[in-house]
Amino acid sequence: MSAPVVVTVRLIRSFEHRNFKPLVYPEVSLDQRVQDFIQMVREDVETRSGLPPPFRKHSYDTMKIIHHAHGAKTNELVMSLDDDEKLILRSDQTLRAAGVASETEVAFFRKEDYEAYKANPRTSW
């Protein structure tokens, strides 16, 4: 078992309106399964004080790696629409096997919203 790492989770409520909020998780075990991490984050989001209700009540179901520490960032303001096969975390994998490392930032969003935005990537203000 390895030492816990820091992972930032970007809650994405709306791709179109660029509505997101980052949360930092300082004690994440890379040996846990993605589905367990998703459940832990969901439970935290639902009860976390200081988060507006629209973020707490949103039905997040998918995680995707945005970037790794010291890696290049995308020009997209919310997250990249590329490399889904490689970057979307599969629930049966461990975080380590899915490519998560220390100081990785992952997006947490509703897949249905992402697919709709990807088909028509327009933003509104």
Image (cartoon, rainbow, N blue to C red):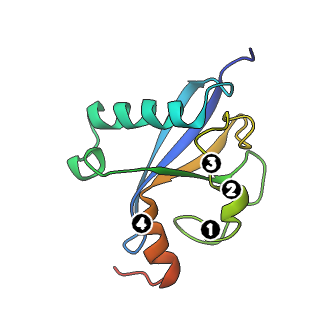
**Cβ–Cβ below 8 Å for labels 2 and 1?**
yes
N-term-proximal mark, 2 vs 4: 2
Q: Amino acid at mark 1?
A: Ser
**Cβ–Cβ below 8 Å for labels 1 and 4?**
no
Between disc 1 and disc 3, the foreground one is 3
**Cβ–Cβ below 8 Å for labels 2 and 4?**
no
Marking on residue 89: 3
Identify the element where label 3 is drawn: loop
Q: Amino acid at mark 2?
A: Leu
N-term-proximal mark, 1 vs 3: 1
Marks 3 and 2, Cα distance to the nearest angstrom? Answer: 6 Å
N-term-proximal mark, 3 vs 4: 3
Which residue carries the number 2 mark? Answer: 87
Marking on residue 112: 4
Q: Is residue 119 visible?
A: yes
Identify the element where label 4 is drawn: helix
On screen, 110 above or below 89?
below
Q: Amino acid at mark 3?
A: Leu
Q: Could you classify mark 4 by the number of other residues whose Cα lies within 10 Å: few (under 14), some (14-19), or many (20 or more)?
A: few
Which residue carries the number 1 mark? Answer: 80
On screen, 101 above or below 28?
below
Question: Residue 96, how many percent across, how many down?
Answer: 73, 34
Q: Residue at x 46, y 61 (%)?
A: 111
Identify the element where label 2 is drawn: helix
N-term-proximal mark, 1 vs 4: 1
